[in-house]
Image (spheres, helix red, strand yellow):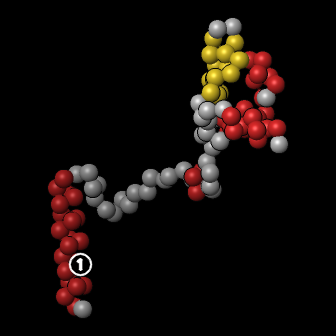
Amino acid sequence: MYAHAVHSCYPLAMEVPVTLFRKQIFVLLGRAQRGETIAVTYKGKRFRIVPEFSPETRFDRLTPLQITNPAMPDLDDKAASDATKSEMLAAWEQKWARR
């Protein structure tokens, strides 16, 4: 209950002295974990507490793979790209004509 009352009185980006940070460390770290920026002042210097990026879902943790097909030409090559596009368009037009 006390932590909730403390939580609601602070602005979104806050600066607190180190003594207040020590007293309410878990409340303030919880706010930082939810994305707020916490600045702690100690001997005239400011220290920011910002959480590291942590993926929200399993799909966010996936590493993309570079998949290549050696039988297909490089699509970055302009001539190969134009030839491939024209072949694909001709194949689509044949399928569409049959319907």
Residue type, mark 1 in image: Trp
Q: Position of residue 78 (x, y in %)?
A: 18, 53
Count neighbours of disc 1 (C-alpha within 10 A) and say few if under 14, some if 14 to 19, many if 20 or more.
Answer: few
**Residue at horizontal 68 percent and vertical 21 percent from the top:** 16
Given residues 22 and 78, the one toward you in this image is 22
Figure check: 19 above or below 29: above
Query: In the shown orientation, is residue 42 left or right of residue 74?
Result: right
**Residue at horizontal 40 percent and vertical 57 percent from the top:** 68
Please identify the residue farthest to the bottom as the structure is shown. 99
Residue 86 visible in rendering: yes
Given residues 35 and 76, the one toward you in this image is 35
Given residues 8 and 41, the one toward you in this image is 8
**Residue at horizontal 72 percent and vertical 32 percent from the top:** 28
Label 1 belongs to which residue?
92
Q: Quadrant of the C terminus?
A: bottom left
Q: Secondary structure at mark 1?
A: helix
Q: Quadrant of the N terminus?
A: top right
Query: In the shown orientation, is residue 55 left or right of residue 77?
Result: right
Figure check: 48 above or below 2: above
Q: Position of residue 19 (x, y in %)?
A: 78, 17
Q: Quadrant of residue 95?
A: bottom left
**Residue at horizontal 23 percent and vertical 78 percent from the top:** 92
Q: Position of residue 60 (x, y in %)?
A: 57, 52
Figure check: 23 above or below 52: above
